[in-house]
Amino acid sequence: MCNPSIAILGAGAIGQLIYHQLVKAELAPYFITRGKTSGQEVLTLTHLNGQVTQSTAELHCIASSDTYKSECLLLSNTRLLIVCVKSYQVLDAIKSAISQLPKSCHILLLHNGLGPHLEVEPLLQGRGLSLGTTSQGAFRQDTWRLKQTGTGITQIGHLSGPLMPSALKLSLLRAIPDSEWCTPILPYLWQKLAINAAINPLTAIENCPNGALAAPKYKQEIDDIVTELVDVAMATGIELDKLALTNRVYSVIELTSANFSSMHQDVTNKRRTEIDSINGYILARAKEYGLTTKVNLSLVKRIKSIEASYLN
Ligand code: PAF
């Protein structure tokens, strides 16, 4: 039986990984889907050590007419909604679910990049909003079979509105390995943005694993990406240590050297990338403050032109 208080919107790799972690902590969340039918699915996770666990998940679609009443009841009992869709899907996902969620429901956005919170906040009608980022790695072998590919920290923190109720917050931090509550959250998300801004587009353009970016030929570009980001963050009131951040980018390059970044995978599979909420977010904020970000602009253009070759 699922626990009606925690819902996950988005059953991609991160949504499913968080699901398995909450199940292990006996929080048994359910999935909200935008498909046509509700039902159950058996989800399988292969852990890093090869151990395999399975659990049956309840999937509830937002508006299937036959089950509409029971869906409404379930949604109206939801106390925490964890949104794990791609950054460019966040706004639509929230729009489709929000009217059915109680006013007391807290929202947690967990995606790569930054930006969707700016459009989501005005739709929440007083609900609390937290943001988070995770460096855990997983990929879907098929729809409901997940393989964990790496451990990593998960950072979550309050952004606006009422705080996440402390019992929920503690349960969440207990369930997700290496997770921490970060206050204020935005500087942490800018730091993660720097990692994604440096690694994701370059690996997608160069068609290489993360580790290849340790080569000296990428040093200047990585340095420029981080410098531009630090200047823009500073204009928005967030102070970052450029040297520490650059070192962090290189440590992620080393720690994930054999991995292919999420943007590399998106391009390889001819999917839309999250460039708008990564380097594109840096451009958008730079524009507001009259700053130029030449290197990030060039990366956005190169990724957009790759996307155009298969999306149009
Ligand atoms: O988006 C990704 O792939 C990951 O966030 C990261 C940290 C760049 C590692 O591949």
Image: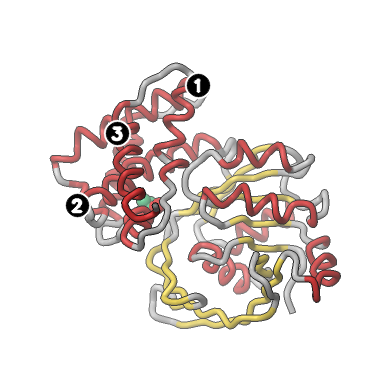
**Image position, residue 127 (x, y; %):** 76, 44
Q: Residues within 10 Å of mark 3 (few under 14, many from 20)?
A: few
Check mark 2 vs ligand 1: CB closer than 8 Å? yes or no: no
Does label 1 or label 2 sit earlier along the sequence?
2
Cα–Cα span, label 1 and label 2: 34 Å
Q: Residue furthest top?
A: 290
Q: Quadrant of the N terminus?
A: bottom right
Q: Is residue 247 found left or right of 163 in the rendered image?
A: left
Q: Nearer the viewer, mark 1 or mark 2?
A: 1
Which residue is tagged 1? 288
Mark 1 falls on what kind of element?
Answer: helix
Say the numbered circle drawn on residue 212.
2
| Among the 4 quarters of the image, the one containing residue 21 | bottom right
Q: Residue furthest left?
A: 216
Looking at the picture, does residue 64 appear above or below residue 193? below
Q: Nearer the viewer, mark 3 or mark 2?
A: 3
Looking at the picture, does residue 182 appear above or below residue 55? above
Depth check, front residue: 138 or 168: 138
How many marks can you see? 3
Residue depicted at 29% across the width and 33% down the height: 298
Mark 3 falls on what kind of element?
Answer: helix
Does label 1 or label 3 sit earlier along the sequence?
1
Q: Amino acid at mark 1?
A: Glu
Which residue is tagged 3? 298
**Do the CB atoms of the residues marked 3 and 2 lie less than 8 Å apart?**
no
